[in-house]
Amino acid sequence: MRLTGLKKNLADSKSREDRMKMIDREEKKLSITKQAELLSINRTSLYYKPVPANDEEYLIKRIIDEIYTAHPEYGYRRMTNILNREYHIRINRKRQRNPHIVYRLCS
């Protein structure tokens, strides 16, 4: 007996966090892959462990915020040069543009 619509209803009625808590890693009859599929969760997200931000990132974010507040016209290239030259923070353009490090400068 197959009941259509239950998967969609569960995904709509429960939050992602609630559905993540429903995963039973000890279940032998139903694999984690199948459980993730039934709960409409990306399987790889079950294994992700977030990395907490360190003090250096907060310092860089504060300095970028100060520079951007004083000079909102600066782009990421000039910001990277200023961080390297004036603050002696060795940071490349990719890390400086990382949204986890810098606020969205365009918004």
Image (cartoon, helix red, strand yellow):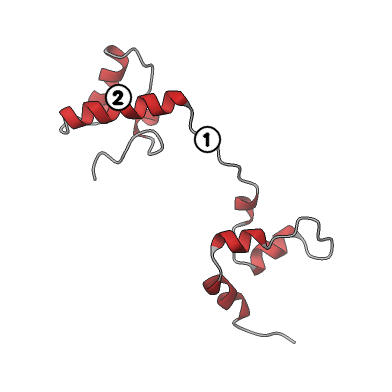
Q: Which one is earlier in the sequence, the residue at label 2 or at label 1?
A: 1
Query: For mark 2, what is the residue?
Result: 63
- Which of the labelled discs sits on residue 3, or is there none? none
Please tell me whether residue 104 is drawn above or below residue 24 in the rendered image: above
In front of the other: 49 or 74: 49
Identify the secondary structure beneath mark 1.
loop
In the image, 57: left or right of 3?
Answer: left
Identify the secondary structure beneath mark 2.
helix
Task: Point out the image quarter for the C terminus.
Answer: top left
Identify the residue at image location x=39%, y=33%. 101
In the image, 56: left or right of 12?
Answer: left
Kindly identify the amino acid type of the residue bearing the numbered disc 1.
Pro
Count neighbours of disc 1 (C-alpha within 10 A) and say few if under 14, some if 14 to 19, many if 20 or more: few
Identify the residue at image location x=52%, y=35%. 52
Q: Where does the image place residue 76, in percent across and percent down from the top left?
A: 27, 30
Which residue appears farthest toward the right when viewing the image?
A: 28
Kindly identify the amino acid type of the residue bearing the numbered disc 2.
Ile
